Amino acid sequence: MFSNWHDAIKRLLISFFALLLTGWLIGEPALVVLAGTLGYLVYHLRQLRRLYNWLRDTDFSEPSPPPESKGIWGYIFDGIYLLQRRERQALLELKSIIDKAQESTAALELAVVMINNRGGLEWWNPAAEQLIGLQTPKDKNQLVINLIREPAFIDYFNKAKFNRPLKLSSPSNPTNMLEFQITTFGEGERLMLVRDISQLHRLEMMRKDFVGNVSHELRTPITVITGYLETMLDDKQNLPARWIKPIEQMAQQSHRMENIIRDLLTLSQLETRASSKQQSAIQLCSLLREVKQDAEQVFADKAHIITLDCADDIYVNGNLSELYSAISNLVLNAAKYTQAHGSIVLRVEKGTRGLLIAVSDNGPGIAPHHIPRLTERFYRVDESRSADTGGTGLGLAIVKHVLARHNGKLEISSQPGKGSQFTCLLPVERIVEPSGLAPITPTPGTQG
């Protein structure tokens, strides 16, 4: 590069001095230099014309050889031609990668859809045509929300909160259940993955129906057994001494079974019934006072110090019995596992993330590896401790489902030996301004 450039400068200087010498010899140096300069400009204009014609007529997918030239222009022509060949090779390699990706995704049962930054469809694999009914090439560049018109999908797509997948009936076959997962990349482009979860959905519905039906059928016999055992214990002075302890243990376990069945039915209702649209503005502090009183009565022998920190003007829009059940489960759990004379704090505050309802205790705490699984049904941190306290292992699962029905989530933090904190986070949209409201306040027995 530098040698070609230096050679061009040398030739230019030599030509200039030769013109100057020739002009001096004939007595017209200015005229000769001017004529030479014009000739030099004509030469370069001709080369520029050749470059323009070559670039205009070149097919960049298959570059044509450059015009023959010498000097700096020969280097320019050859350099551009080399860049064209390199670009063509890079395009071929990129096309090969894209072709392989498209071939591999074509074999997937998973639908893959690429969406541009305007929300239009760029590309999709054959599975997308089967699962969501896209048509090639008719739907090319069509807005995805015009083709999938379900309000839930439109809301999911527009809010762009893709941390959780969306489950929805198939637009092309309503009997099938699909799971939509969207991720963003590039400059606002989106990749949408859709899979058929119809079989999993049917199995899940069968499981829920089975649990609900079995729990309902078990309720009557367990109630009868519990009733007879309580009657026998009421008259235990007439029982043989050796039967008193077994009957007491049977009564204790039958009560525990009743609690499990009750929680299973509650969980089944939360899973299978749609969220109630008849929701009211609930005075949260009043609800928490009721929960606090219940915990103090149930665990009176432990003499816990239960503190409530909540402003009277905080209202939340929701289902009273469900929220009562969720918060009551958290407080009763804290009371169960906190030592006698321990401290439990119920705190409510408005934050940038929404409404926080925190239940803290200074109990034994929970090891970190248990925390991700605490909301699973029947999960035990300590089997022996759960047996002693009579827990069903369903309380936190109920809390999780209640919060999900209120667009919220449960956050858990704990340190062994230092206590735990369970925080219900409800979105800002659930907070209701108190002005002009007739709030629903809890009354005893609303925990349903």
Image (cartoon, rainbow, N blue to C red):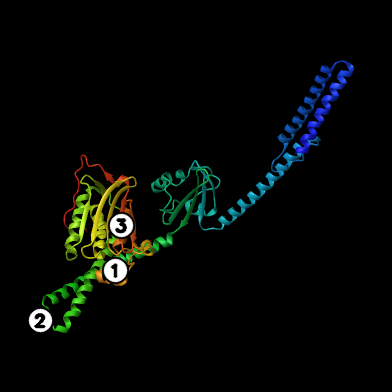
Residue under pointer 1: 214
Relative to 37, residue 421 above or below = below
- Residue 170 left/right relative to 412: right
Q: Say which of marks 3 and 2 sits in front.
A: 3
Whole-percent x and y of residue 318?
26, 50
Relative to 334, residue 181 above or below = above
Residue under pointer 2: 238
- Inspect the image, locate mark 2, and give the three-letter code of the amino acid beneath it: Asn
Quarter of the image holding residue 77? Answer: top right
Q: Residues within 10 Å of mark 1 (few under 14, many from 20)?
A: some
Whole-percent x and y of residue 439?
20, 46
Measured in 3D between alpha carbons, the distance from the residue under mark 3 to the one under mark 2, in whole angstroms, is 48 Å
Relative to 15, residue 63 above or below = below
- Inspect the image, locate mark 1, and give the three-letter code of the amino acid beneath it: Val
Label whose residue precedes the other's in the sequence (1 or 2) = 1
Element type at mark 2: helix
